[in-house]
Amino acid sequence: MSWLLLALGLVLVVEGLVFALAPSRLEEIMALLARMPVETRRLIGLLALTVGAMLIWAARMLGL
């Protein structure tokens, strides 16, 4: 359970940094995403999910 809280905290830190350091750039990215086809956004989401799962697996194998 503690690793789940750690992961959630890290996600919130990264999200917070994006909003704090580059809010105008975030608006540009959102506009770009709105213009992308749904299938492309789905593929990006699946890729992010896969990379995230691999990072979690690697951290667990390293004993973190």
Image (spheres, rainbow, N blue to C red):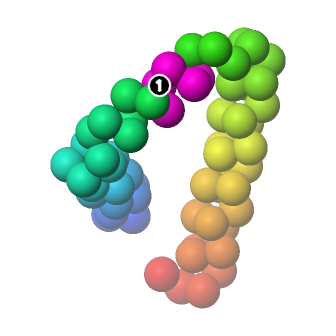
Quadrant in the picture for the N terminus: bottom left
Q: As displayed, is residue 2 above or below residue 16? A: below
Foreground residue among 43 and 57: 43
User: Which picture quadrant has residue 56?
Assistant: bottom right
Q: What amino acid type should be assigned to the residue bearing mark 1?
A: Met
Q: Residue at x 66, y 74 (%)?
A: 58
Q: Residue at x 63, y 14 (%)?
A: 35
Name the spot of residue 64 as percent of width and height, x first.
48, 81
Foreground residue among 24 and 38: 24
In the shown orientation, is residue 34 left or right of residue 5? right
Q: Is residue 9 visible?
A: no
Name the spot of residue 6 as percent of width and height, x first.
33, 62
Instruction: Tell which residue pokes out farthest to the bottom in this image.
Output: 62
Name the spot of residue 13 as percent of width and height, x first.
27, 56
The range drawn in magenta is 29-33
Queried whether the magenta region covers residue 9, the answer comes back as no
Few, some or many residues within 10 Å of mark 1 (<14, 14–19, 20+): few
In the shown orientation, is residue 19 left or right of residue 26? left
Name the spot of residue 23 as percent of width and height, x first.
27, 39
Q: Residue at x 72, y 49 (%)?
A: 50
User: Which picture quadrant has residue 39?
Assistant: top right
Q: Is residue 53 visible?
A: yes
Q: Residue at x 50, y 20 (%)?
A: 31
Which residue in the structure is indicated by mark 1? Answer: 30
